[in-house]
Amino acid sequence: MNIKYLLISFFLSITFSSCFFYSFQGTSIPPEVDTFYVERFDVRASNAIPTLGQTLSEALKDKIRSESNLKQTETDPDIEFKGIVSDYRITSEAPQAGEQTAFNRLSVTVSIEYIYKLDEEKGWKQNFTFFSDFASDANLIDVQDALLDDINAQMIEKVFNQAFNNW
């Protein structure tokens, strides 16, 4: 008899904790929204790697597919994302004596347009800028992939939250 109550308590706690987790995430997609489309982001920053736009747009698609019930379509989507990589910059940060810097910074800016076709007033355009630092004696080519992975993860999380969360 005690095992029966223990099992029921266990299953109820799992059920309620998963409900709490989902609601804690704050994803708020109206029920009438079923489909999305992410256009391949254009790269207009002169020194950016050519594949950055595709990498960002694919990462956003993956995020939406994995964290929502929306279906991807190219034909008449309910919501659409367009993006432009507008800036890709390496700067020297934290100057030190002897004309050296403590570290360098890779910054990426992407201009995102969110089109909500069911209510145009809920659409928006916004620039998102994120950066990652690296040692001043490191070669950018050697660390670029890791830096971009970090920047892309931050960027996609912020864009997703801006579009689907009430924060």
Image (cartoon, rainbow, N blue to C red):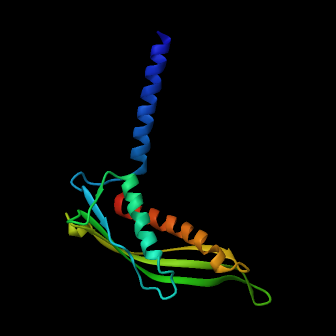
- Residue 95 or 109: which is nearer the viewer? 109
Place residue 126 in its image quadrant.
bottom left
Q: Position of residue 158 (x, y in %)?
A: 45, 65
Which residue is found at the position 44% from the left and 70% from the top?
Answer: 56
Tell me if residue 73 comes above or below residue 19 in the rendering.
below
Which residue is found at the position 48% from the left and 88% from the top?
Answer: 46
Which residue is found at the position 27% from the left and 64% from the top?
Answer: 79
Tell me if residue 64 comes above or below residue 13 in the rendering.
below
Q: Residue furthest right?
A: 98
Tell me if residue 86 comes above or below residue 161 in the rendering.
below
Q: Position of residue 115 (x, y in %)?
A: 27, 69
Q: Quadrant of the C terminus?
A: bottom left
Which residue is found at the position 55% from the left and 67% from the top?
Answer: 149
Residue 105 appears in the picture as rendered: yes
Place residue 93 in its image quadrant.
bottom right
Q: Position of residue 80 (x, y in %)?
A: 29, 67
